[in-house]
Image: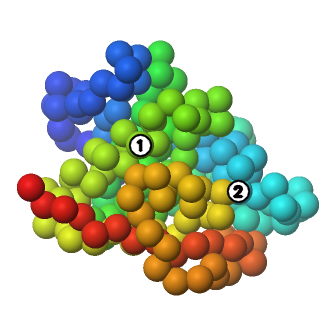
Amino acid sequence: MRNTQPFDEILKVMVNNMIIIRNYLDRDAESVGKLIAETYGDFNLSFASSEKRNEFLGPFQHAWSTDKSHKEEIARVLKASIMYVALKEDRIVGVLRGKTDKLQSLFVSGTEHRQGIGRNLVDKYEAECIAQGSETIKLMSTLYAVPFYQSVGYRKSTGVRSMKSFDGDGLRYQPMKKILTHP
């Protein structure tokens, strides 16, 4: 996905004078892939053996590979219509992927939790969804992330369910949604 916005439009949100949130760029794929592999594995897949963990990680299990096909597959899987990254000292520490009606994934580096990065990524994403006319956002939260999403206004919409993640089967998730308030 090629971003054609001018650089001054990409740098939009400053958080705590040290975090920058900007649109995702194609050159971010490798860093984002590593962030997802680490965060998804450490915080959402602790229940799985290393073999099963790789099944759930899919192409992200190869995030440190130098193989061109692995890099291309990660870049392909990352594609989303709305994507933001959070940077701290030029290092990607957060990523949000979504559509106007569905937050597909949100990952923040474990060393950066509880610093407002996830909240600010969600705020920017919701503002874009509102600008595009969305009224509701749905998501499938891992059980680990439910308290975070509740803290930013999402509510459980049904009971806990189980889904497939790449080749891994049985990942438990909580469907959630938020009705957006338009100004």
Q: Residue at x 24, y 64 (%)?
A: 180
Pointer 2 residue: 44
Q: Percent x, y for residue 5?
A: 18, 38
**Mark 1–mark 2 distance (CA, rounded to whole Å):** 19 Å
> What residue is rendered at 55% in x and 35% in y?
114
Nearest the camera: 72 or 150? 150
State whether residue 48 appears in this view.
yes
The residue that label 1 is drawn on is 119
Image quadrant where residue 138 sits: bottom left
Q: Is residue 25 left or right of residue 42?
A: left
Marks 1 and 2, the one that precedes in the sequence: 2
Q: Residue at x 23, y 30 (%)?
A: 12
Q: Is residue 65 above or below residue 104?
A: above
Image disc number at residue 145:
none
Q: Is residue 180 left or right of residue 177?
A: left
Residue 50 vertical placement versus 111 (above, below):
below
